[in-house]
Image (cartoon, rainbow, N blue to C red):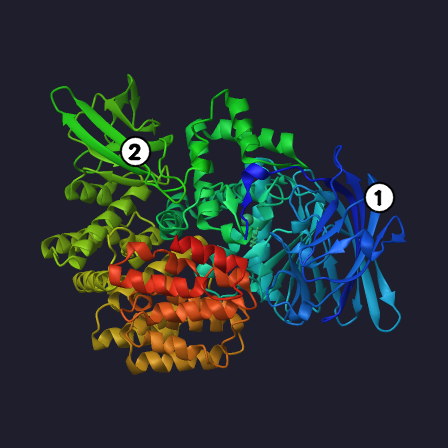
Amino acid sequence: PQPIRLADYAPPAFLIDEVRLDFDLAPNTTRVKAKLTVRRNGEHAQPLVLNGERLKPVSVAIDGRVLAEAERTIDAEFLTIPNAPDAFVLETEVEIDPENNKALEGLYMSGGRFCTQCEAEGFRKITWYPDRPDVLSRFTVRIEADRKFRHLLSNGNLIDAGELPGGRHFAVWNDPFPKPCYLFALVGGELDVLEDKLVTMTGRTVDLRIYVDPGMAPRAAYAMDALKRSMKWDEETFGREYDLDLFMIVAVRDFNFGAMENKGLNIFNSSLLLADPATATDMDYERIESVVAHEYFHNWTGDRITCRDWFQLCLKEGLTVFRDQSFSADMRGHAVQRIKDVKALRARQFAEDQGPLAHPVRPSSYLKIDNFYTATIYEKGSEVIRMLKTLIGPEAFRKGMDLYFERWDGHATTVEEFIRCFADVTGRDFEGFFAWYEQAGTPRVSLKQSYDAAARTLELELAQETPPTPGQPTKKPLPIPVTLGLLDGDGRTLAFERDGQAADETLIVLDQASAKVTLTGVDAAPVVSALRGFSSPVELTTDARASDRYVQLAGDADLFNRWEAGQELARALILARAKGAADEVSEERYAEALGRALNDQASDPAFKALLLALPSESDLALAMAPADPAAIHAARDALRLRLSLHLTEDLQRLHIGLQELGEFSPDAASAGRRALRNAALDLLAANPRAETGELADGHYRAAANMTDAMGGLSALMQIGGDLYENALTDFFQRWKAEPLVIDKWFALQARDPDESALGRVMGLTAHPAFDEKNPNRLRALVSTFANFNPARFHDPSGAGYRFLADQILAVDGFNPMTAARLVEPLGGWRRYKPELGALMRKELERIAGTEGLSKNVYELATKALA
Ligand code: B3K
Ligand code: ZN
């Protein structure tokens, strides 16, 4: 297959001014009529070429005249009309089979209801169309179906509806905003609806509706609340008002990813929408809040202003992630949110950037764009926007955003044009900054300090280097914002001067391979707190001593760096153990320091919960070359046991003291207390004494909400034995009618580091509740195992890899997009011990060599091997 290249971009040969779609819905034989008002774009003699896949042709007509077969060609991918007029009306009719569409792209059925997913290239499975984001058109959609499909929804405003003979009915929707076809959506089925209203900043009333499975409306209440807060926040923070009179969200159980921002009709994976205390954890609430916000924010950054081509994906995704992260930070606390975002960035994006699938935030070629909905495009894309804001300051950032909205509203545009807005409002040159979009790889930054007590100066020597990535052997220096402050030996903020200006904190922009910065007026030997708030997505190494880290852990004014210091200390201790050089004295010192941090009454429980969590095994694997997952697992467990023993009393006190008496509330403060209490239990459970089993069992049985039930169950999993087995059975019996809860049951067993886990996971694929056709269930078991159970996935026999490869090949037969997402865990093969790497490679080769592979899996498997 031939890759698509950014360099080959050409404007569309034809434009579509109006679209009229007529759907006659039936599970196996849906008829789709399309009437397109087409216009040649510029002077050329190119044929009209429309995308279309898996469509059963019925007819093709131009200006009312049915075309003879010789006048058009139809193949597996295109409808081509060589001699099209310059302006005309094209009418086509096709038949499709939603019920047998298990790829979940285009029009398909979930739970007996019709729904769609068109981004990136699913619309071509519905009708012939120029399926590219730079063709914007106004859509009118008529849907007709049996009355049992009670709600018939599409984008925009309902302009007509009524009953029809034969037990049928119809609805007509019009969306006044021109949009690319990837934002089209349709839903048909029996649903319950939760309704609300919001008055916008200009006093317009917007109807809000969330459609869910019958009986589930109360579980949409939190999503509705999050939606209203998002709408207000976007008005207050970015001056963006919602534009239609109606905003709808529909939850479906079968969905390839999280949610989709279709204009006025977002479609959500039900796992990211439905919540109540009994069935959802605090983490679920948190994700619902952020995804509802994310999809809503797309209305401006994605829908009103869309991408010219799919290479510009980060233009909407990176920016919208930045917006949702900023929203969550305002809702839940900036430091805690930042720590969580950076943890996720390191876990997913840093790993991607260090492997064969590394690619720039704006890639320059692809086989399947579906493979580029990655942590790099999303999370690193957001980091780039964040750096932009740090570099120019919040006021200039807001001005640049305002200009972007003003200049590009109603258009499909590019990253260059986005950046140009900031250049125009600041008068600055962003050429160097653009490398953040074009260069893959995580930059390595080093920092050396030398203090001159007599001169009261601190000299800082910074250097950067970005390692080679596939297709990019050499890299240029990037402009790296490094926010930096100083502490004295007691952890108090130490003032200094930079260029004669007094400061507590300063921003150093490292835009050369290396640089020296001198701070003056430094009254005491300082501890340097660098890269505060993780001011750029880099790997920082410094010449700080362990004692400096302890000072930071105890008192850094920057909470991110306070947490980071703890992680650095823990990482060093675990890696030392993994290499057979355990430093027990330092381990005790670390336990002491953690104990003091836990007893700090001034700090937030959510923050303490984060302090208590050791770096994850995959995070540690990135820091060990070559990585030995078994050694990491054992070393991390050993440190956990030591901490648990040392902190037993503190942890027990937290576990008792944080018991919840009142009613459940999902707010951040309550969630933070539950997080700390469960983190305390988790660490206590590292100590396999009989009491911890009873404690965990009691916690599980007394749980009044899903957060605590999962906390208990997960502690029992660590302990194992009958208590765990009984709780597992109890949990399944209790929740077997709740798919979202049963997903958690599968996922928990997939994370179990016990020797028996792989056998258990393989057995679970034959469990009656397992369904590989449902992406949530598949991910709960298979993806959780491959991504979050390194000790068992990297079984020395290679059985874990074999299991994953078998699953990928099986799923690729019907759902390539979801199958491709499972390839990544094998992609890191070069980073592991050679004997493991070879086994991983073998499975990638087996996948790549399989006949009839989808383009999606083919692209990732071959790139991972290259
Ligand atoms: N824009 C969608 C992602 C579509 C993924 C298609 N493979 C969800 C989001 O980022 O908001
Ligand atoms: Zn998005």
Residue 662 in view in this figure: no
Residue at (24, 47) in percent of width and height = 568
Label 2 secondary element: strand
Residue 259 image position (x, y, % from top left): 57, 56
- Taking the image as shown, residue 453 lies to the left or right of residue 568, namely left
Residue 639 image position (x, y, % from top left): 19, 60
Label 1 secondary element: strand
Which residue occupies the extreme top position in the image? 500
Q: Quadrant of residue 800?
A: bottom left
Q: Quadrant of residue 656?
A: bottom left
Residue 233 image position (x, y, % from top left): 56, 42
Residue for badge 1: 88
- Taking the image as shown, residue 617 lies to the left or right of residue 329, namely left
Residue at (87, 67) in percent of width and height = 164
Ligand 1 is within 8 Å of the C-beta of the residue at disc 1: no
Residue for badge 2: 464
Residue 213 in view in this figure: yes
Q: Quadrant of residue 67?
A: bottom right
Looking at the picture, does residue 715 appear above or below residue 327?
below
Give the amino acid at mark 2.
Answer: Gln
- Taking the image as shown, residue 458 lies to the left or right of residue 278, namely left
Residue 272 image position (x, y, % from top left): 53, 60
Q: Pointer 2: residues within 10 angstroms few (<14), some, or many (20+)?
A: many
**First-in-chain label (2 vs 1):** 1
Q: In this view of the protein, which residue sits in the foreground, 418 or 568? A: 418
Residue at (37, 74) in percent of width and height = 700
Give the amino acid at mark 1.
Answer: Phe
Q: Say which of marks 2 and 1 sits in front.
A: 1
Which residue occupies the extreme front position in the image? 70
Ligand 2 is within 8 Å of the C-beta of the residue at disc 2: no
Looking at the picture, does residue 500 appear above or below residue 489?
above
Q: Pointer 1: residues within 10 angstroms few (<14), some, or many (20+)?
A: some
